[in-house]
Amino acid sequence: MPIITTVLLFYSVDKWNEWFNAMVFIRSADIQPLQNVLRSMIVDSQAMGEASALVSIEDRPFTSGIKMAAVVVTMVPIMCIYPFLQKHFAAGVMVGAIKA
């Protein structure tokens, strides 16, 4: 059971962070996954930051804050699931590390 839980955790994190397939195959903005929406927000904020390079520092958009908020939003579901799987995850990692 611990090994299956470890593989399940790694697989779910991989699928949660997958954005490239949706970017390539989904053209409708209505059904874009969360990762693509956050990516477009970050790209747009960087473009606004570069466009406002001549504006005074007080009037520039806070692009690093948008990036940090996107990271937090992306991490929340994994952080909610991890405590329930942590016991099995630690045991699954140790099974592969201990020599018999």
Image (cartoon, helix red, strand yellow):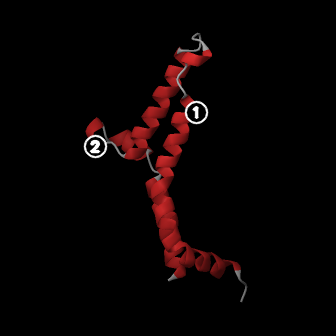
Depth order, front residue of 54/13: 54
Depth order, front residue of 49/32: 49
Could you tell me the amino acid type at mark 2? Answer: Ile
Q: From the viewer's perspective, tell me whether residue 21 is left or right of residue 53.
A: left
Compared to residue 10, the image places residue 66 above or below, namely above
Q: Dot 1 corresponds to which residue? A: 64
**Alpha carbon of mark 1 to alpha carbon of mark 2: how far?**
27 Å
At x 48%, y 30%, the residue is: 43
Q: Nearer the viewer, mark 1 or mark 2?
A: 1
Circle 1 SS class = helix
Query: Do we see residue 28 in this rendering?
Result: no
Q: From the viewer's perspective, tell me whether residue 94 is left or right of residue 47.
A: right
Q: How crowded is the residue under tag 1: few (<14 C-alpha within 10 Å), some, or many (20+)?
A: few
Compared to residue 38, the image places residue 88 above or below, namely below
Could you tell me the amino acid type at mark 1? Answer: Ser
Circle 2 SS class = helix
At x 66%, y 79%, the residue is: 94
- Furthest-bottom residue in this view: 100
Q: Position of residue 77 (x, y in %)?
A: 45, 58
- Furthest-top residue in this view: 54
Q: Dot 2 corresponds to which residue? A: 31
At x 51%, y 60%, the residue is: 79
Depth order, front residue of 17/58: 58
Q: Position of residue 8 (x, y in %)?
A: 47, 70
The C terminus lies in quadrant: bottom right
